[in-house]
Image (cartoon, rainbow, N blue to C red):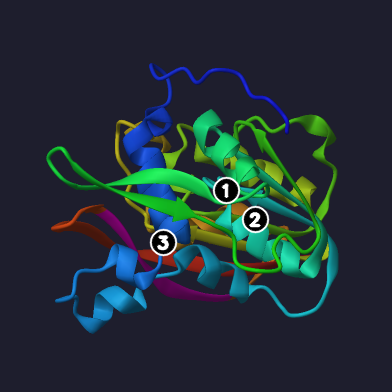
Amino acid sequence: MESFPTPDLSTNPYETERLLAEYLLFHYGTSDEILPASAPPGMKDALDFAVRTTRHFSTGPVARTLDLGCAVGRSTYELSRHSEETIGIDFSQSFIRAAAALAEGPLPYQRLDEAHLRTSLLARLPAGLPDGKVAFETGDAMHLRPDLSTFDRVHAANLLCRLTEPQLLLDRLPDLVKPGGELVLATPCTWLGEYTPPENWPEGSTLEWLESSLGSHFELLRQSDEPFLIRETARKFQWTASLLSVWRRL
Protein backbone atom coordinates (compact mmCIF):
# COMPACT_ATOMS: atom_id res chain seq x y z
CA MET A 1 0.00 0.00 0.00
CA GLU A 2 1.19 3.52 -0.76
CA SER A 3 2.94 5.29 2.11
CA PHE A 4 2.15 8.86 3.17
CA PRO A 5 4.22 11.42 5.08
CA THR A 6 3.69 12.02 8.80
CA PRO A 7 0.83 14.52 9.41
CA ASP A 8 1.65 18.05 10.57
CA LEU A 9 -0.85 18.64 13.38
CA SER A 10 0.11 22.32 13.65
CA THR A 11 -1.24 23.22 10.21
CA ASN A 12 -4.27 20.97 9.73
CA PRO A 13 -6.94 20.54 12.43
CA TYR A 14 -8.18 17.40 10.66
CA GLU A 15 -5.11 15.36 11.62
CA THR A 16 -6.23 14.41 15.15
CA GLU A 17 -7.29 10.90 16.19
CA ARG A 18 -10.56 12.27 17.54
CA LEU A 19 -11.61 13.84 14.23
CA LEU A 20 -10.44 10.78 12.30
CA ALA A 21 -12.71 8.62 14.48
CA GLU A 22 -15.62 11.07 14.08
CA TYR A 23 -15.33 10.95 10.30
CA LEU A 24 -14.95 7.18 10.13
CA LEU A 25 -18.19 6.97 12.12
CA PHE A 26 -19.80 9.67 9.94
CA HIS A 27 -18.91 7.84 6.72
CA TYR A 28 -19.12 4.17 7.69
CA GLY A 29 -21.05 3.91 10.96
CA THR A 30 -24.35 2.06 11.11
CA SER A 31 -27.51 3.62 12.48
CA ASP A 32 -27.10 1.65 15.71
CA GLU A 33 -23.49 2.82 16.10
CA ILE A 34 -24.37 6.49 15.59
CA LEU A 35 -27.82 7.14 17.03
CA PRO A 36 -29.14 6.94 20.60
CA ALA A 37 -32.27 4.88 21.20
CA SER A 38 -34.21 8.12 21.75
CA ALA A 39 -33.22 9.67 18.39
CA PRO A 40 -36.05 11.57 16.63
CA PRO A 41 -36.81 10.76 12.96
CA GLY A 42 -34.94 13.83 11.71
CA MET A 43 -31.65 12.46 13.00
CA LYS A 44 -32.13 9.18 11.14
CA ASP A 45 -32.97 11.08 7.93
CA ALA A 46 -29.60 12.83 8.16
CA LEU A 47 -27.54 9.62 8.05
CA ASP A 48 -25.56 8.42 4.99
CA PHE A 49 -24.75 11.93 3.74
CA ALA A 50 -21.56 10.70 2.03
CA VAL A 51 -23.67 8.27 0.01
CA ARG A 52 -26.67 10.52 -0.66
CA THR A 53 -24.66 13.31 -2.26
CA THR A 54 -23.24 10.90 -4.86
CA ARG A 55 -26.75 9.99 -6.00
CA HIS A 56 -27.32 13.47 -7.42
CA PHE A 57 -25.30 12.61 -10.52
CA SER A 58 -27.17 11.25 -13.53
CA THR A 59 -27.26 7.49 -13.91
CA GLY A 60 -25.01 5.50 -16.18
CA PRO A 61 -21.30 4.65 -16.40
CA VAL A 62 -18.51 7.19 -17.00
CA ALA A 63 -14.76 7.00 -17.47
CA ARG A 64 -13.33 9.36 -14.80
CA THR A 65 -14.63 10.84 -11.54
CA LEU A 66 -12.97 13.20 -9.04
CA ASP A 67 -13.93 13.51 -5.36
CA LEU A 68 -12.51 16.68 -3.80
CA GLY A 69 -12.34 16.94 -0.02
CA CYS A 70 -12.99 13.20 0.11
CA ALA A 71 -12.19 12.86 3.86
CA VAL A 72 -12.10 9.13 4.70
CA GLY A 73 -13.38 8.12 1.30
CA ARG A 74 -16.95 6.80 1.45
CA SER A 75 -18.16 9.05 -1.39
CA THR A 76 -15.10 8.14 -3.46
CA TYR A 77 -15.83 4.45 -3.14
CA GLU A 78 -19.52 4.99 -3.87
CA LEU A 79 -18.65 6.97 -7.01
CA SER A 80 -16.55 4.03 -8.20
CA ARG A 81 -19.77 2.05 -8.72
CA HIS A 82 -20.32 3.90 -11.99
CA SER A 83 -16.83 5.08 -12.94
CA GLU A 84 -13.90 3.23 -14.47
CA GLU A 85 -11.45 5.47 -12.56
CA THR A 86 -12.12 7.48 -9.40
CA ILE A 87 -9.67 9.77 -7.59
CA GLY A 88 -10.20 11.03 -4.04
CA ILE A 89 -8.20 14.03 -2.84
CA ASP A 90 -8.08 15.50 0.67
CA PHE A 91 -5.74 17.85 2.53
CA SER A 92 -5.65 15.57 5.59
CA GLN A 93 -2.96 12.92 5.40
CA SER A 94 -4.54 10.83 8.17
CA PHE A 95 -7.89 10.84 6.35
CA ILE A 96 -6.23 9.74 3.11
CA ARG A 97 -4.28 6.97 4.84
CA ALA A 98 -7.52 5.67 6.37
CA ALA A 99 -9.42 5.89 3.08
CA ALA A 100 -6.73 3.92 1.24
CA ALA A 101 -6.44 1.34 4.03
CA LEU A 102 -10.14 0.49 3.84
CA ALA A 103 -9.60 -1.09 0.42
CA GLU A 104 -7.45 -3.70 2.19
CA GLY A 105 -10.02 -4.59 4.87
CA PRO A 106 -11.87 -3.32 7.99
CA LEU A 107 -10.20 -0.48 9.91
CA PRO A 108 -10.43 -0.39 13.74
CA TYR A 109 -11.10 2.90 15.52
CA GLN A 110 -12.34 4.20 18.88
CA ARG A 111 -15.70 5.97 19.11
CA LEU A 112 -15.75 8.60 21.86
CA ASP A 113 -18.70 8.10 24.19
CA GLU A 114 -18.01 10.22 27.26
CA ALA A 115 -14.89 11.52 29.05
CA HIS A 116 -12.46 8.53 28.95
CA LEU A 117 -15.11 6.06 27.77
CA ARG A 118 -14.68 4.75 24.25
CA THR A 119 -16.12 1.92 22.16
CA SER A 120 -14.05 -0.13 19.72
CA LEU A 121 -15.61 -0.22 16.25
CA LEU A 122 -14.65 -1.34 12.76
CA ALA A 123 -15.09 0.79 9.64
CA ARG A 124 -15.65 -1.37 6.57
CA LEU A 125 -16.63 -0.93 2.94
CA PRO A 126 -19.96 -2.28 1.71
CA ALA A 127 -19.70 -5.50 -0.26
CA GLY A 128 -18.64 -5.01 -3.86
CA LEU A 129 -16.68 -1.79 -3.37
CA PRO A 130 -14.56 -0.51 -4.91
CA ASP A 131 -16.10 -1.39 -8.26
CA GLY A 132 -13.88 0.64 -10.59
CA LYS A 133 -10.26 1.67 -10.03
CA VAL A 134 -9.87 3.95 -6.98
CA ALA A 135 -6.85 6.03 -5.96
CA PHE A 136 -6.36 8.45 -3.05
CA GLU A 137 -3.89 11.30 -2.68
CA THR A 138 -3.25 14.26 -0.43
CA GLY A 139 -3.70 17.60 -2.08
CA ASP A 140 -4.82 21.19 -1.65
CA ALA A 141 -8.13 21.87 -3.42
CA MET A 142 -7.03 25.46 -4.03
CA HIS A 143 -3.79 24.35 -5.71
CA LEU A 144 -4.49 21.03 -7.37
CA ARG A 145 -1.73 19.41 -9.38
CA PRO A 146 -1.86 20.64 -12.99
CA ASP A 147 -1.83 17.20 -14.61
CA LEU A 148 -5.19 15.97 -13.26
CA SER A 149 -6.74 16.43 -16.71
CA THR A 150 -10.54 16.39 -17.02
CA PHE A 151 -13.36 14.33 -15.49
CA ASP A 152 -16.88 13.29 -16.39
CA ARG A 153 -17.97 13.93 -12.80
CA VAL A 154 -16.58 16.11 -10.02
CA HIS A 155 -17.92 15.87 -6.48
CA ALA A 156 -17.03 18.27 -3.64
CA ALA A 157 -19.05 17.94 -0.42
CA ASN A 158 -18.65 20.25 2.60
CA LEU A 159 -15.39 21.65 1.26
CA LEU A 160 -15.86 25.22 0.02
CA CYS A 161 -16.39 26.91 3.39
CA ARG A 162 -13.30 25.23 4.81
CA LEU A 163 -10.92 26.76 2.24
CA THR A 164 -8.98 29.96 2.85
CA GLU A 165 -9.54 31.09 -0.76
CA PRO A 166 -12.50 29.11 -2.14
CA GLN A 167 -12.62 31.24 -5.28
CA LEU A 168 -9.41 29.55 -6.41
CA LEU A 169 -11.21 26.21 -6.57
CA LEU A 170 -14.22 27.67 -8.37
CA ASP A 171 -11.87 29.20 -10.95
CA ARG A 172 -10.25 25.78 -11.54
CA LEU A 173 -13.49 23.81 -11.91
CA PRO A 174 -14.13 24.65 -15.59
CA ASP A 175 -10.79 23.02 -16.45
CA LEU A 176 -11.62 19.88 -14.42
CA VAL A 177 -15.07 19.05 -15.80
CA LYS A 178 -15.44 17.86 -19.41
CA PRO A 179 -18.02 19.59 -21.63
CA GLY A 180 -21.31 17.88 -20.83
CA GLY A 181 -19.88 16.58 -17.56
CA GLU A 182 -21.47 17.07 -14.17
CA LEU A 183 -20.48 18.86 -10.98
CA VAL A 184 -22.05 18.29 -7.56
CA LEU A 185 -21.21 20.80 -4.84
CA ALA A 186 -22.46 20.67 -1.26
CA THR A 187 -21.67 23.25 1.39
CA PRO A 188 -23.23 24.01 4.79
CA CYS A 189 -22.35 27.69 4.21
CA THR A 190 -20.85 27.92 7.71
CA TRP A 191 -18.39 30.66 6.89
CA LEU A 192 -15.94 30.91 9.80
CA GLY A 193 -12.95 33.21 10.10
CA GLU A 194 -10.65 30.46 11.39
CA TYR A 195 -10.99 28.70 8.04
CA THR A 196 -11.87 31.44 5.53
CA PRO A 197 -10.90 35.09 6.11
CA PRO A 198 -14.07 37.26 6.01
CA GLU A 199 -12.80 39.14 2.97
CA ASN A 200 -13.05 35.83 1.07
CA TRP A 201 -16.65 35.10 2.11
CA PRO A 202 -19.46 35.56 -0.45
CA GLU A 203 -20.83 39.10 -0.42
CA GLY A 204 -24.40 37.83 -0.81
CA SER A 205 -25.80 34.35 -0.46
CA THR A 206 -23.59 31.36 -1.17
CA LEU A 207 -25.87 30.24 -4.02
CA GLU A 208 -25.70 33.68 -5.65
CA TRP A 209 -21.91 33.55 -5.40
CA LEU A 210 -21.82 30.11 -7.02
CA GLU A 211 -24.09 31.23 -9.84
CA SER A 212 -21.92 34.29 -10.45
CA SER A 213 -18.66 32.33 -10.36
CA LEU A 214 -19.77 29.29 -12.36
CA GLY A 215 -22.54 30.62 -14.59
CA SER A 216 -20.41 31.36 -17.65
CA HIS A 217 -19.13 27.76 -17.78
CA PHE A 218 -21.88 25.70 -16.10
CA GLU A 219 -25.65 25.38 -16.19
CA LEU A 220 -27.30 25.07 -12.78
CA LEU A 221 -29.61 22.06 -13.05
CA ARG A 222 -31.08 22.09 -9.54
CA GLN A 223 -30.36 22.86 -5.90
CA SER A 224 -31.67 21.40 -2.66
CA ASP A 225 -30.85 20.93 1.02
CA GLU A 226 -29.14 17.75 2.23
CA PRO A 227 -29.04 17.27 6.02
CA PHE A 228 -26.14 15.52 7.71
CA LEU A 229 -25.36 14.37 11.23
CA ILE A 230 -21.98 14.08 12.96
CA ARG A 231 -21.83 12.33 16.32
CA GLU A 232 -19.33 13.92 18.71
CA THR A 233 -20.23 12.01 21.90
CA ALA A 234 -23.10 9.83 23.08
CA ARG A 235 -25.04 13.00 23.94
CA LYS A 236 -23.77 15.59 21.47
CA PHE A 237 -24.50 15.67 17.74
CA GLN A 238 -24.04 18.17 14.92
CA TRP A 239 -27.16 18.37 12.71
CA THR A 240 -26.60 20.58 9.67
CA ALA A 241 -28.29 21.24 6.34
CA SER A 242 -25.88 21.46 3.41
CA LEU A 243 -26.76 23.47 0.29
CA LEU A 244 -26.39 21.01 -2.60
CA SER A 245 -26.21 22.18 -6.21
CA VAL A 246 -25.92 20.18 -9.43
CA TRP A 247 -24.28 21.70 -12.51
CA ARG A 248 -23.61 20.67 -16.12
CA ARG A 249 -20.49 21.88 -17.93
CA LEU A 250 -21.34 23.88 -21.05
Residue extending farthest to the bottom is: 41
Residue at the disc numbered 2: 76
Mark 3 to mark 1 CA distance (whole Å) = 16 Å
Q: Whole-percent x and y of residue 68?
A: 61, 47
> Crowdedness of circle 3 by 10 Å Cα count: few (<14), some, many (20+)?
many
Residue at the disc numbered 3: 29
Q: Is residue 221 above or below residue 4?
A: below
Closer to the camera in the image, 215 or 27: 27
The kind of secondary structure element at disc 2 is helix
Q: Is residue 178 above or below residue 118?
A: below
Judge left or right: residue 64 versus residue 239: right
Given the image, on which type of amino acid does mark 3 rest? Gly
Q: Whole-percent x and y of residue 7?
A: 50, 21
Q: Which mark is residue 70?
A: 1
- Write down the quadrant of residue 54 in the picture: bottom right
The kind of secondary structure element at disc 3 is loop
Q: Nearer the viewer, mark 3 or mark 1?
A: 3
